[in-house]
Amino acid sequence: DVFDFGGDGCYVDAAVECLQFNITDGQCSPSARKWVHWVAANFTDPPIEQYDFADVCGDGSALNLASKQAYADVIVGHYAERFGDRVAGYWFDQGTHSNTTAIIKAVRRGSKKAVVAINRGIKIPLQNNNAPPASDPDAGEDYTFGHMVPHQTNTNPVDGCLVLSAEASRDGYVYPQVTPSNDLSQPQPPGNPYVDPNFAISYTETTPNEASLAHVFMPTSQTWNGGSNVVWSINQAQEWMKRVIDAKGAWTWNVRRRGCAGCTTEGTNPSEINYPDLRFLQSVNAGLPGGSSPISSDYRYNATNCDCVSSKSTGTDRGFGCADPPPSS
């Protein structure tokens, strides 16, 4: 969600630039205006000479479609071709507002090895939201974007469903056809299937081109790239990460870097990982296979379904842990 100076819109730039250019109509973004002007003149056939700047935000307009294609071919394509196989993979945000097929094809032109994920589609269960079109079977995603869902008190879902998705995968891969098919990332999905004691996630294995690696993406703190504390218990982080890896899936931690809002004052290099996050990663890694203190399969943070409201027991089993208070540091 981004805003223009003075009102809602799809671009943003510094307010001082808006005032400098005397643009106060709520669509202030000088750099974006230059880009759109270039796209209109060079990426449409015939060139669009007269246009409303707001058209670029309207899905389906000629300028909107040209801007999406230009982003993929000119910007993504530039970096993909420049760095080639030196970049192992890409994770694109805001995929809902992009031409995902064009982006993937641009990456493929620069590197046949780089893997691609795009933040677009249903979060839970994990599934291939960007399967390739029949006309280009190589233009699909390689791994799921795996974006977690913020937990709301006394509501479902809990992100343990991402763990169950990986464990239900076919040798680490998920597909577009999944049961249940409704979006379980909503606080109370229709029918609330979490409370069903027979709840299960299953995938219909289709073609290899529709296989997407089950990947989970979690922040270490309460917000992406910032926040005052690591909010995970070490045991829960170790268990969840181990279960996903054991299922042949993948896990990525979003960590804070030095200098972020709420970070400690340890260290002076802003390119370094925030030290509490680094110590957290070291502790989690110790409990994984090959670590100094690998954990067993006797999991404490576990449940037979994704119910966050009622699955927490009073014994050593913590359910999926959503009723537990976060650690203080």
Image (tube, rainbow, N blue to C red):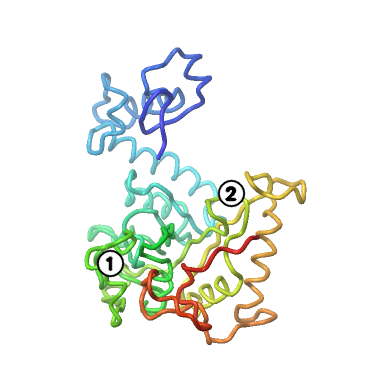
Q: Residue furthest front?
A: 314
* Spot occupied by residue 183 in the image (x, y as percentages of width and height): 28, 62
| Residue identifier under label 2 | 226
The amino acid type found where label 2 is placed reads: Gly
Residue 35 location (% of width, % of height):
41, 28
Q: Position of residue 322 (x, y in %)?
A: 46, 67
Task: Identify the residue shown where x is 43% and y is 73%.
Answer: 163
Residue displayed at 57% across by 50% down: 225
Residue at horizontal 27%, vertical 68%?
192
**For the residue labelled by badge 2, is the local secondary structure a helix, a strand or a loop?**
strand
Q: Residues within 10 Å of mark 2 (few under 14, many from 20)?
A: many
Q: CA distance from mark 2 to mark 1?
A: 33 Å
Asked if labels 1 and 2 touch by Cβ distance under 8 angstroms, the answer is no
Q: Residue at x 57, y 59 (%)?
A: 220
First-in-chain label (2 vs 1): 1
Residue flagged by tag 1: what amino acid is it? Pro
**Front disc: 2 or 1:** 2
The location of residue 98, given as percent across then percent down, is: 34, 45
Above-or-below relation of 256 to 188: above
What quarter of the picture does the N terminus occupy?
top left
Q: Quadrant of residue 313?
A: bottom left
Residue reaching furthest right?
A: 267
The residue nearer to you, when weighing 161 against 319, is 319
213 relative to 55 in the view: left or right: right
User: How many circles with numbers are drawn on the protein?
Assistant: 2
Residue that label 1 marks: 176
> Would you place residue 108 above or below residue 240 in this image?
above
Which of the 4 image quadrants contains residue 231? Answer: bottom right
Query: Which type of secondary structure does the marked residue at label 1 adopt?
Result: loop
